[in-house]
Every structure is written in C-alpha cells, then in structure tokens.
Amino acid sequence: MKARKGISPVIATVIIVAVAIAISIAVAGWLFGLWSGLAGGSPQIQISSATVYEDGTVEMYVVNSGSGADKIIKVTLNTGTNTYTLQPNTTEIPANFKGWVTATPPQGTTITLTPGQTVSITVTFEKSGDVPLQAVVKAGTAG
C-alpha cells in the first residue's frame, strides 16, 4: 500500500490562524460599521429650512449627516391649485453636506404666488425618497 502524504502540521496551523484572523476582521468591521464608508454608506437627509418667493423660487437648507451621497431627482411645488416641477441648482448632495440648494421654475415658466400663502414642497431624492415640507411665501424674489 502507498503511504498518504498530507500537509505538515505547521502549515495547517498557519492556515487555520490566517482564516481565523480574516473572519475576526470581517466581523469587527461589520459590528463597528467600518465597511459602510467603503461601500458608499447611506445618506441621512434633512431639510431644516425653506423659503419660497413670489416667483416660485425655493431656497432650502439641506443637511446630509450620513456617510453616503444622495441625488435630488426632482423638486415639486404644490400651491393647492397647481403643481410645478422646479429645477435645482445642484443635484448631488455629498456625504456630510450642509448648505443651501436653490430650485427655480424652468425657463419659460411663470409662477406668481401671493406673500403669506402656504405651499407644499416635495424634494425627491434617489436614495432617501420624498422629503415633504411646507413653507409660507415671502415677498420679493431670491437674490
């Protein structure tokens, strides 16, 4: 009969230790969220303030406190009788972003609102979905 040969006990021990270390690193990364930054993370979007002007321009203070970016798909202004789709000046909202985003009526679209009127705004994000808010129309135009 032929004698069977296997790997040496030293090599087997090294392989087992390496596999155990790799599994430990993977579990620690999962538990402590270390991989979320590498995988793109998730956004946490809030709109803390919004101003609507008579011409339909909307200024919003957007905060993304998450570790992932998001994208504005559309901004909708609902006056109660009419609904308008506005164009944001930026669509990319990076991770840890805090700043103003302005949405304006498309070129050729005239919107006339009354100061004091309450309107609804819905900002649709690619990952965060719809963020609804209400605002009171302010006299004047953005500038």
Image (spheres, grey):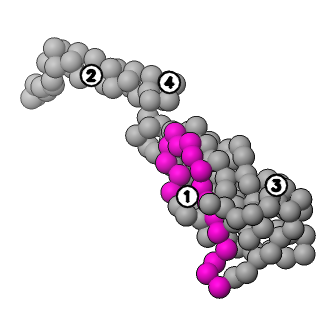
Residue located at (50% from left, 24% from top): 32
* Disc on the earlier residue, 2 or 3: 2
Residue 4 percent across, percent down from the top left:
13, 26
Numbered disc total: 4
Q: Nearer the viewer, mark 1 or mark 3?
A: 3
The residues tagged by marks 2 and 1 sit, at their Cα atoms, a distance apart of: 41 Å
Closer to the N terminus: mark 3 or mark 4? 4
Magenta-colored span: 91-108
Q: Say the numbered circle drawn on residue 71.
A: 1
Q: Does label 1 or label 3 sit earlier along the sequence?
A: 1
In reply to whether residue 76 is colored magenta, the answer given is: no
Residue underneath mark 3: 135
Around disc 2, counting alpha carbons within 10 Å, would you say few (fewer than 14), some (14 to 19), or many (20 or more)? few
Front position among marks 2 and 1? 1
Q: Which residue is mark 4?
A: 32
Disc 3 and disc 4: Cα gap in Å? 39 Å
Residue type at mark 3: give it. Ala
The quadrant in which residue 44 appears is top right
Asked if residue 50 is positioned above or below residue 75 in the image, the reply reads above
Residue at image point 55% right, 64% down: 89
Query: Where residue 58 sits: x, y (%)?
Result: 70, 61
Q: Secondary structure at mark 1?
A: strand
- Mark 2–mark 3 contact, CB under 8 Å? no
